[in-house]
Amino acid sequence: MLSRVVQLEEGKEIAFTNGRTVLNKAFPLKLILLFGLFLAFSFAFFFISVSTIKYYGINSVVTSVTSSFVPCHEKPNDLDKWIKPSMVLMHNMSDEELLWRASFMPKRKKYPFNRVPKIAFMFLTMGPLPLSPLWERLLKGHEEHYSIYIHSQVSSSANFPPSSVFYRRHIPSQVAEWGRMTMCDAERRLLANALLDISNEWFILLSESCIPLFNFTTIYEYISKSKHSFMGSFDDPSAYGRGRYHPNMAPEVSLDQWRKGSQWFEVNREVAVSIIKDTLYYPKFKEFCTPACYVDEHYFPTMLTIEKPAALANRSLTWVDWSRGGAHPATFGDQDINEEFFTRILKGDNCTYNGRYTSMCSLFARKFSPSALEPLINIAPKILSF
Ligand SMILES: *[C@@H]1O[C@H](CO)[C@@H](O)[C@H](O)[C@H]1NC(C)=O
Ligand SMILES: *[C@@H]1O[C@H](CO)[C@@H](O)[C@H](O)[C@H]1NC(C)=O
Ligand SMILES: *[C@@H]1O[C@H](CO)[C@@H](O)[C@H](O)[C@H]1NC(C)=O
Ligand SMILES: *[C@@H]1O[C@H](CO)[C@@H](O)[C@H](O)[C@H]1NC(C)=O
């Protein structure tokens, strides 16, 4: 090390000595050179000073000239950053940062631009989406009216091609366990990410085993014309309802306010913001609703019934079959898919929609296994009209 430094120092010394030797031999030339250098330095200093003083003035003149003379050149509108959704869904905001950001809400009723309200389809999955071809078929051609978000526990290596409606629609995800608060966290994460797009007006939570029961036009009409958000919410007096209530939830939640409902919801923007902004009920449910209290069946229904009862239809839009009994609803495979099966789903119900009785109660159904895909694709044009 030391020898190398010495060598370098020596080299510099030699070079310097050589230069001086040359200059010493031509003394008048050195004076002229020095004078020239002095002049150059003075001019440089002068120009730098002047440009520094004038910098902002000159800069703004140049900008305004460019913008008025080159109107075709795309200069983003300053409003765009508030209304244009980001094409990249991956971000590194923490949940706390994300929920805070997503809780921003305009207070003026009218939008100062042509807002086409969209449906946000939010897929809460373990890994892949085996029924994706069915959803592709439903959604293709309706790009103006929907957005897709995927929260996937297993980082999906089976990525979708650029032509797919699911291409690059994954959001930053974390582990979500059934019946635990991490499940509600994942649902809030989906809502918050979807809220970042100001055009999303309705938010539907779906799983990888869900299917649509109608074509896109019908789904959009039903949801956009509804006066209510479809959150299942009812008072279950049994051990599986009120029996899960913990007295320490009071005073925020009393026993008669305790509600139960399916996890699979459809909510409008206002209700979605209520869910993600909550800091009052969240700690109570996190601490006092642990298995056998399944928090994903109680937190949102209870909280919203207290905060926004008139906004709720108190029923879910997602059909599910509990008739086979047990802890989990029935799963349907290729053997189950036929016309009679869908007649049962599509006509067998009676509920209210905007205050009127109807048999059209569900827009989605679960649970379907991957083997159901092919028969579903075959039957869709005739039975499901897409
Ligand atoms: C997020 O990424 C930016 C740069 O892309 C970095 O400056 C910032 O510290 C990151 N934040 C977190 C919370 O990781
Ligand atoms: C969508 O389905 C409805 C019936 O639910 C049908 O009347 C309508 O023609 C369908 N629309 C398209 C575009 O297929
Ligand atoms: C849903 O339930 C709440 C109270 O539990 C009630 O105020 C509201 O009117 C109900 N919604 C409908 C559509 O009946
Ligand atoms: C639905 O139920 C209500 C009240 O129970 C009844 O009046 C109505 O006729 C029923 N509608 C259908 C289509 O069954």
Image (cartoon, helix red, strand yellow):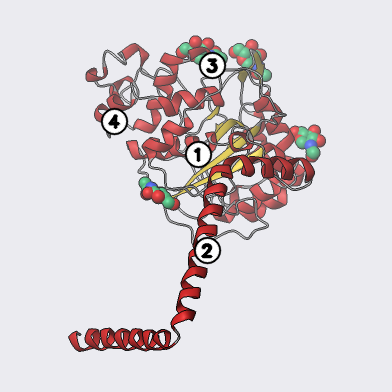
Q: Is mark 2 within 8 Å of ligand 1?
A: no
Residue name at image x 20 percent, y 85 percent? 1
Secondary structure at numbered mark 2: helix
Q: In the drawing, does residue 2 fall left or right of residue 125? A: left
Q: Is mark 4 within 8 Å of ligand 1?
A: no
Q: Nearer the viewer, mark 3 or mark 1?
A: 1
Q: CA distance from mark 3 to mark 1?
A: 22 Å
Res. 204 visible in picture? yes
Q: CA distance from mark 1 to mark 4?
A: 22 Å
Q: Which residue is mark 3?
A: 311
Dot 4 amino acid type: Lys
Rendering quarter of residue 360: top right
Q: CA distance from mark 3 to mark 4?
A: 25 Å
Q: CA distance from mark 3 to mark 2?
A: 79 Å
Dot 1 amino acid type: Asn
Q: Which residue is mark 1?
A: 193
Q: Nearer the viewer, residue 374 or 134?
A: 134
Q: CA distance from mark 2 to mark 1?
A: 61 Å
Q: Nearer the viewer, mark 4 or mark 2?
A: 2
Chain-order first, disc 4 or disc 2: 2
Dot 2 amino acid type: Leu
Q: Which residue is mark 2?
A: 39
Q: Which residue is mark 4?
A: 286
Secondary structure at numbered mark 4: helix
Dot 3 amino acid type: Ala
* Residues tagged 3 and 1 counted as in contact (Cβ below 8 A): no
Secondary structure at numbered mark 1: helix
Res. 142 visible in picture? no
Q: Residues within 10 Å of mark 3 (few under 14, many from 20)?
A: some
Which quarter of the figure is the C terminus placed in? Answer: top right
Rendering quarter of residue 116: top right
